[in-house]
Amino acid sequence: MAGSSNGSSPDPRPAIWLCHQTDGPEIAHPDWLTGYERDTVSKFSGPREREYLTSRWLIRQAIGKSANQPPHHCRPVDGRPVASDSPGGWRLSLSHSQGLSACATRAGSPVGLDLEPCQRHPQWQKVARRWFSPVEQEWLFREDDPNTFLKVWTLKEAWLKATERGIAGNLQTLEVRKNFEIYGDQLEEDWQASCCYIEGYLVTLVFRGSRPQWPDITLLEPPPGDFTLMDALPIETSWEPLFQRTIRPKR
């Protein structure tokens, strides 16, 4: 399935922008970093440093391509990058794992993104037993499929990002029932979720919208070795849709 499609709509699609992280020697930190970002990256070294720089490079690409602005004119708010600072008006969600970074964008309304390598599910029964609801445990243990668990986990992670909450004490604010019927603790009835496979990863998006939609998905060329903020070109990719759901309010 093609990774991107555009069209006018009263309810614009969310978008997901991805890029692979590249290895390389330590470099001087690029001058486009904000003061906050410079202070943060100075605490890292090695792969963690490059992961951070890649994610900040990708955020600027994602804002720029969404807002039709050059990437060097774009930056997120300081702290957790949940929105754009310049230009304003864009909500953001960032996720990265094992060499792949992703940034979701949506105009003016909440968005949450999580990605996980498809093979990541060690001791999943222990995690479910400790943190999931009895309803979730019952059907997950009966199915006994680590890939099903991973879909539920990414739904919860994306939900917490979209509602701007941490994991601690909040994993049961979203309950995923058999056949991926989803119930959340928000009263609004316009929360949506979509889940797909891309580049060997499970990618799950939660957003506010009047109807379920597949996001526009674009894989970008990786950043150059010095993280210059040139306009990154898309790379051909394909992705496999899994499911879309409306998240219903718990009653």
Image (cartoon, grey):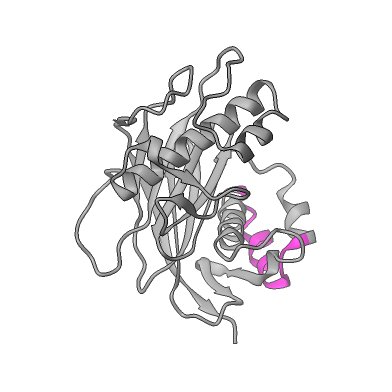
Give coordinates of residue 48: x percent, y percent: 66, 28
Give coordinates of residue 151: x percent, y percent: 55, 54
Q: Is residue 134 shown in magenta?
A: yes
Q: Is residue 115 shown in magenta?
A: no
Give coordinates of residue 245: x percent, y percent: 44, 67
In this view, 167 is above or below 56: below
- The answer to whether residue 199 is visible is no
Quadrant for the C terminus, please: bottom right
Magenta region: which residues?
131-146
| In this picture, residue 24 sits left or right of residue 11 | right
In this view, 239 is above or below 46: below
Residue located at (35% from left, 43% from top): 64
In which quadrant of the rendered view does residue 178 lie? bottom right
Residue located at (59% from left, 25% from top): 50
Please name whichever residue, 218 or 63, is drawn nearer the observer in this view of the structure: 63
Give coordinates of residue 107: x percent, y percent: 38, 60
In this view, 118 is above or below 98: below
Residue located at (48% from left, 51% from top): 85
Residue located at (51% from left, 78% from top): 248
In this view, 228 is above or below 83: above
